[in-house]
Image: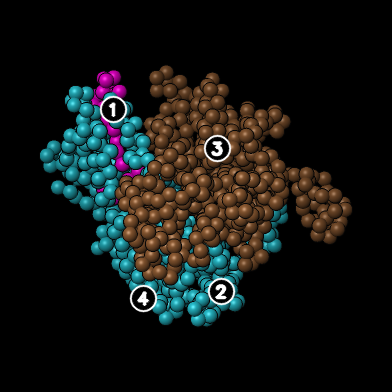
Chain colours: A cyan, B brown
C-alpha cells in the first residue's frame, strides 16, 4: 500500500512542496534570486528550530560534560591566519577562461567549453581561498579586511581558556555551538545541501591524546543515535573512512556519514579526530593543567560536525511518502512522516462544517485548549493550526503533506458528548476522545516520540 | 536591606561578572580582541536563548495572526537598492584627517584632534554607507559585491507574497523573524549595547492604512507587556516620540522605548509605522487582494523592532543587586534576580559535604531526577547544575551571582527522611521538601514565573 518514491524526481517534488507549503523559499526570489540562497518559511523555521532545540537539549543541556557558546560570526582575522584557513588548505582549485576570464572549478568544468563566451582554452588550475571577506571601518582595503567565519569550530577553540576559567570543567569535556558559517564556493547547489551561507551544529570534545580512540567511538555512536532520532533510516547511512590523502591536514582520522541523497551518496555529517592541531595554533603555552598531577598540555580534540540544513533536507527526504489508499481506489496522498517532535504543527483542529456556528464555536474552544501549554512547565505550547476550508478529506490531505501528526474534528456528536475525532497521520485511523482527555491523549504520543 | 547599585561603576561590574562567570566574553580576546565584538559563553547563551524562545512563543506560536520566517543573511544586492539602504539614508557622517586620512564620525570627534597623527584639520563631513560588503564568487569587485543585511526587516518584505501564498493569512497579520544584522558603524560601544554584528527580533505587521493608529497602539501595549515579562521596571522605560526631522524617511510615526542605561537614557526598542514604503519599493503591482471586495493594494506596516543583545543587557542591569545581609552583619552578596523563566539554571544541587560518599550519592540521585524533563511533554528539561566545592555559604554566593532560583542541599537528614533543603534565591528562606515532591514543588514556582 505504501509506495516510497525514490527516483530522480524526488528532489523536484521536495523543492516544490517546500515552496508551495512554506517550508523553504528561493532566496531573494522577487529579484531573480541569489545563487543558491534559500529562506526558511513559516513551517521550515519551526522544523529547523525543532532540530536545533533537540540537538541542544541532547548534547548540551542533558549532559554534564558539555558547555554551550555562541561566538561572533566575525572574528579577528588573526584567528583565520593561525587556523590555516587563509592558506591553501581552505581553497578551491579554479581555472580561468583565457578569452573572457570567467572562472570555473577545475574539477567540475564540463567539456572545457566556457559557458560565457564559448572559449576552449583555460589556465592551469590555481587555488582560490573560500573565506568570505568583508571590511570593518569606513575604509575598504586589506587593513580593515575581516572574514565571515568559515566554520563555527574556531569560535570554540579561541574561547577554550575562557570556558575552562568559568566552568571549571576538566577533560574529557566538550564545547558546543550552533550558528552560521560561510564558504565562497563556486558551485554550490542541490537545494539546501550546499549553500554559501549555512548553519552548523558542532561539538569540540577535549580529551587526552591516549584516549582518542575511545572517545572517537563514543561520538560515532552518539551520531548514529542522533540520526535515528531524526527518523532517518540507518540503512541509508554509510560510514566512510576518509583516506590519508583526502583528510584535512589537521586530522588523523575522519569518518564521513554519507546519506543516500537522490543526487548520490553525499556527506551528511562528519566526525574528525583533529588532534591538538587547533589548540596548538592558538595557544603558544599549554592551555590545560591537570589539577592532580600538575601536568600541562594541549588537549586533543574529537569533532562531531553536523549541518543543520543538510539535516533538514535528509529529514524531508526520509519522511516524504506517496501513498495510494487502496480502500478508496486511486485516491492517493502525500505524507511527511516526520518524527512527532520535529513536526511543525503537532495538531490541526477542524469544525466539521465551517457554516455551522455551533461547530465553529466548539472547535475554537478545543483549539484554544491545545494552544495553551499542556502543562505550565512546558517551555513551549504544542503548536496547533486551524483549518475550516473545503471538506474534511481535503483538510486531511493538506495536513498530511506538512506532517501534522493529529487531525482533530469537531462534529455534531461533539456538541452532545464533548468528544472529538482524532485521526492519526500515519495509520489514518480515527478514534473518539473526550475533550477533557485530549491534552493527555496527545501528550502520551508526544512523550514516546 | 536590599541596596540597588545604580552608579557609574555598574557597567564595569556587569562586564566583569559576565566575563568571570561565563555570560559574555570579549570577542577574539586571545588575539587582542576585535573592536566591540562579544561572544556569549555557557550561561550567556542559555539566557539569550531563553529570551529568544520566550519572544518566539509569545509573538509567533501563541498568536493566530503571525507567521515566522528565517531568511538568508546575504540577499540579492537589488534588495538593498530598492529599500534605499545603499543610499544616504543608511549612512554615517564622517570627517577625514587631512594629514593621515583617518576617518571619524563627524558628530563624535573629541576636540578635533586626530588620535592617530595629532592632526587638527579635517575635511567637511561626508556620508559613508554602513552596509557591510562582501563578495560572492571567485573574483572580488563591484560585479560580485553583496551585502550582509543591515536589518532583518527586508528579508520579511521580499517574502511577503510567499507568505501570503503559503499561509492564506489575511490582513491584519504579521511576519516575525529572529536573526543577525550588520552595520559598519564607526563608534559602536557600551558593551553589547551597540555592536557591528547584532541580533534582532522583528515583526512586520501588515494592516489597512486607515487602521494604523489602532494597531500602533496594540503593538505599543504588547511591547510594554514584553518589557514587564523580562522583569524590567517600567519606571525606567521612557516612550519618546521621534520628531519629524529625526524619523527615518519611511516612517510616519516612531516611538523609541528608552531605558535608563548607566551610560544614559538610550533606545532599547523601537516601534515604527513604516507606511507602505517598503512593499511599494519591492512590488510594482499591488501585492495584496481583498478576497471579499476584490480591492488590490499595498498593505501598510507597523514594525515593533527589538534588539536581542540590548534585551540581555537591560535584563542583566535590572536583575543585578548588591545586598547586605543584616542578619549576618557585613556579609553581603551579589544576586541576579532574573525572572525564573530566563535564569540559565533553574536549580543547583549540592551534597552538604563533598567527602561523604553517601551524601554525594543521594545528591546525584536528586540531580538526575531534576535533569530529566519534569513532564515528558516538556520540550526542555529544567536546566540544573551541580556544585560540591567549598562550603554551603560559598555555593549560595556563587549561585546567587548567576541568578539560580533554587539551591537544593542534600544533608544527613535527607538520608533518613528522603527530603532536601530548598533555598530561595530572592528571599534566602529555606524549606524542607520531600524528594518525591521536589519536581512538583519547583514546577509550581516556574509555572507562575
**Left or right: where does residue B175 sit relative to residue B88?**
left
Whether residue B133 is situated above or below residue B155 in the rendered picture: below
Tell me the distance, in whole angstroms, between the alpha carbons under discs 3 and 2: 41 Å
Percent x, y of residue B290? 43, 23
Q: Chain of mark 3?
A: B
Q: Chain of mark 1?
A: A
User: Is residue A343 magenta-colored?
Assistant: yes
Whether residue A187 is situated above or below residue B266 in the rendered picture: below
- Residues tagged by mark 4 and mark 1 found on one chain of the structure: yes
Q: Chain of mark 2?
A: A
Q: Which residue is mark 4?
A: A214
Whether residue B343 is situated above or below residue B302 in the rendered picture: below
* Residue B227 numbered mark, or none: 3
Q: Which residue is mark 2?
A: A287
- Residues tagged by mark 1 and mark 3 found on one chain of the structure: no
Q: Which residues are magenta?
A: A335-361
Say which quarter of the image contains residue A404: top left
Amino acid at each position: 500500500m505504501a509506495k516510497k518514491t525514490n527516483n530522480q524526481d524526488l528532489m523536484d517534488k521536495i523543492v516544490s512542496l517546500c515552496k508551495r507549503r512554506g517550508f523553504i523559499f528561493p532566496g531573494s526570489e522577487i529579484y531573480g534570486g541569489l545563487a543558491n540562497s534559500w529562506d526558511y518559511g513559516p513551517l521550515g523555521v519551526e522544523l529547523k528550530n525543532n532540530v536545533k532545540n533537540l540537538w541542544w537539549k541532547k548534547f548540551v543541556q542533558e549532559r554534564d560534560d558539555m558547555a554551550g557558546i555562541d561566538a561572533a560570526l566575525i572574528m579577528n582575522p588573526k584567528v583565520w591566519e593561525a587556523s590555516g584557513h587563509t592558506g591553501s588548505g581552505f581553497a578551491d582549485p579554479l581555472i580561468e577562461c583565457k578569452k573572457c576570464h570567467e572562472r570555473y572549478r577545475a574539477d567540475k568544468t564540463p567539456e572545457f567549453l566556457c559557458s560565457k563566451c564559448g572559449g576552449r582554452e583555460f589556465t592551469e588550475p590555481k587555488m582560490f581561498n573560500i573565506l568570505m571577506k568583508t571590511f570593518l571601518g569606513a575604509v575598504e582595503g586589506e587593513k580593515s579586511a575581516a572574514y565571515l567565519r568559515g566554520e563555527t569550530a574556531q569560535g570554540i577553540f579561541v574561547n577554550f581558556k575562557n570556558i575552562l576559567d568559568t566552568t571549571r570543567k576538566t577533560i574529557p569535556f566538550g564545547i558546543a555551538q550552533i550558528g552560521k558559517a560561510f564558504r565562497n564556493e563556486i558551485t554550490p547547489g542541490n537545494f539546501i545541501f550546499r549553500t554559501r551561507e549555512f548553519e552548523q551544529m558542532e561539538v569540540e570534545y577535549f580529551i587526552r591524546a591516549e584516549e582518542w580512540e575511545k572517545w572517537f567511538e563514543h561520538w560515532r555512536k552518539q551520531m548514529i543515535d542522533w540520526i535515528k532520532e531524526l527518523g532517518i533510516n540507518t540503512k541509508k547511512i554509510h560510514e566512510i573512512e576518509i583516506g590519508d590523502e583526502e583528510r584535512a591536514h589537521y586530522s588523523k582520522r575522519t569518518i564521513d556519514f554519507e546519506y543516500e541523497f537522490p543526487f548520490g551518496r553525499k556527506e551528511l555529517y562528519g566526525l574528525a579526530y583533529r588532534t591538538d592541531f587547533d589548540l596548538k595554533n592558538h595557544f603558544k603555552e599549554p592551555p590545560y593543567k591537570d589539577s592532580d598531577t600538575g601536568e600541562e598540555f594541549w588537549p586533543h580534540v574529537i569533532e562531531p560536525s553536523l549541518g543543520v540544513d543538510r539535516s533538514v533536507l535528509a529529514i524531508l527526504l526520509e519522511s516524504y511518502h506517496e501513498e495510494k489508499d487502496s480502500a478508496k481506489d486511486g485516491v492517493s496522498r502525500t505524507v511527511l512522516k516526520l518524527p512527532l517532535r520535529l513536526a511543525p504543527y503537532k495538531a490541526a483542529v477542524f469544525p466539521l462544517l465551517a457554516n455551522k456556528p455551533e461547530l465553529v464555536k466548539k472547535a475554537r474552544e478545543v483549539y484554544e485548549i491545545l494552544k495553551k501549554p499542556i502543562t505550565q512547565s512546558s517551555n513551549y505550547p504544542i503548536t496547533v493550526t486551524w483549518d475550516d476550508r473545503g471538506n474534511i478529506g481535503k483538510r486531511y490531505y493538506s495536513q498530511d503533506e506538512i506532517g501534522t501528526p493529529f487531525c482533530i474534528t469537531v462534529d455534531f456528536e461533539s456538541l452532545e458528548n464533548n468528544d472529538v475525532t482524532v485521526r492519526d497521520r500515519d495509520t489514518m485511523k480515527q478514534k473518539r476522545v473526550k475533550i477533557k482527555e485530549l491534552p493527555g491523549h496527545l501528550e502520551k504520543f508526544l512523550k514516546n516520540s
